[in-house]
Image (cartoon, helix red, strand yellow):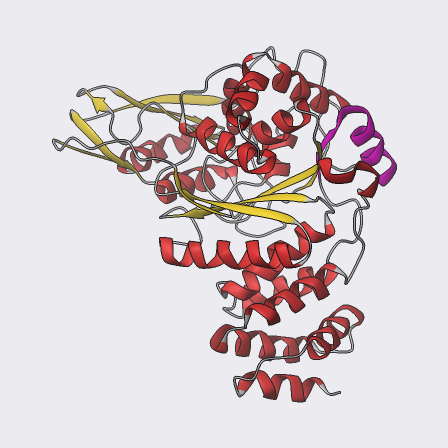
Amino acid sequence: MRIYDVIDDKRNKKALSKDQIDFWIKGVTDGSVADYQSAALLMAIAINGMTDEETYYLTTAMAESGDALDLSAYGDRTVDKHSSGGVGDSTSFIVIPVMAALGRICAKMSGRGLGHTGGTLDKLEAIEGVTTSLSEEKFYAQLNSAGLVIAGQTRDVCPADKILYALRDVTATVESIPLIAASIMSKKLAAGAKNIVLDVKCGKGAFMHDLKSAEKLAQLMVETGKRAGRSVSALITDMDQPLSDYIGNSLEVEGAVEVLKGKTDCPLYKVAEALCVRLLNYEGAEKDVLNAVRSGAALDKFREMLIAQGAKEDVLEKPLCRANCKIEIYSDKGGYVQSVDAMKAARTVLALGGGRNRKEDSILPHVGLKFNVRRGDRIEEDGLVATMYFDKYEDVAYAKDVLDAVKISDKKVSAKNPVLKIIK
């Protein structure tokens, strides 16, 4: 078999066989297929697409290209979640502790932020003392004792995906739905959980801007996971406005802790609850999730995890955000909030130093925004819109960008349900 023939088949819109895809991914991993050949094949896929069967073959080939977590000792109690990337999204810090409090085993391998989306590892490491770099021995020991871990990869998981993603990033092939689905699901399969829920963001602050594209991606990932023998479902959730009032690494953890301390009348809890319900998948799950929060059991699990990963005993008894400066931003007119632009808000936090444009960039963990308004709220002239946290005095100029992200008019609008659709 020659990689030339594989490229030629896909260029001519033919469906690739399992043997062809396995041959390609093996070559990607061992270096026998050149980057320029993989780039050509990726572009052919981006242009001509893949069948569901091809996507499944690609997913499993990438999942098997490296190491995988062995969670077989825990039976069917293992759970995992994935978000396609949003703004103000700290649901992992709610879902994983709730699941652990309800007796599930949660071994979550997460990533760092790039561009406008925040990274779970960056948010955790914004907490003093916390590490997300765990040895394999420590990873499994914590899983056995506490039932939950959120950390970086402990093994060389899905090396083929790392190589192909780097190529996609520079060849304008990132947005191909089959390639997105295979990239996400290969890592979820290698992470070992039996039960998986996917949070596919849709809107201005998401990679999927319209419901049709988000639904197509969600359906493909769910079917791919089911074909691999996992229990998988997905939510499509709104990302036209930030999910939480908090945007920024340490601030987003504070927002999640607020929920774990009982603030359940907010979109962040609503989405987290819906994700938990899909993982539990039984009648009355909503009540159990709420009880896990209101009893303090989920908060205790989150605290236990943070302490196990290096935080001090009183980690949740004091503010987590320690920015050098803050400024309150007030509205210049009264009316109703039509929208809070998630992308504009995220780009402001990025400009403040709270995100990365390149993987090697460092971040400022405590900069960010806390909004006081959401879509549908009434605000008076000179009413408080948001508080901006920053490290350099000259960054006060970004306050105007925060104000520009909030659209106010005389028209009364309703709040939007953050859960747009459920894919089972």
Quadrant for the N terminus, please: bottom right
Could you tell me what secondary structure mostly forms the magenta stretch? helix
Of the pair 191 and 151, the residue shown nearer to us: 191
User: Is 299 part of what is drawn in magenta?
Assistant: no
Hey, which residue is sitting farthest right in the picture?
A: 137
Of the pair 175 and 398, the residue shown nearer to us: 175
Q: Which residues are magenta?
A: 135-151
Does 357 sit above or below residue 178? above
Instruction: Determine which quarter of the picture holds residue 66.
Output: bottom right
Does 141 sit above or below residue 14? above
Residue at 77% across / 72% down in the picture? Answer: 26
Residue 322 in view here: no
Image location (x, y in percent) of residue 139? 81, 35
132 relative to 293 in the view: left or right: right
Image location (x, y in percent) of residue 65? 77, 63
User: Is 150 part of what is drawn in magenta?
Assistant: yes
Residue at 53% across / 59% down in the picture? Answer: 220
Image location (x, y in percent) of residue 398? 36, 35
Of the pair 284 and 347, the residue shown nearer to us: 284
Does 246 sit above or below residue 420? above
338 relative to 294 in the view: left or right: left
Image location (x, y in percent) of residue 8? 60, 88
- Count of numbered tags: 0
Residue at 44% across / 29% down in the picture? Answer: 270
Does 17 sit above or below residue 342? below
Hey, which residue is sitting farthest front in the picture?
A: 283
Residue 176 in view here: yes
Residue at 55% across / 46% down in the picture? Answer: 233
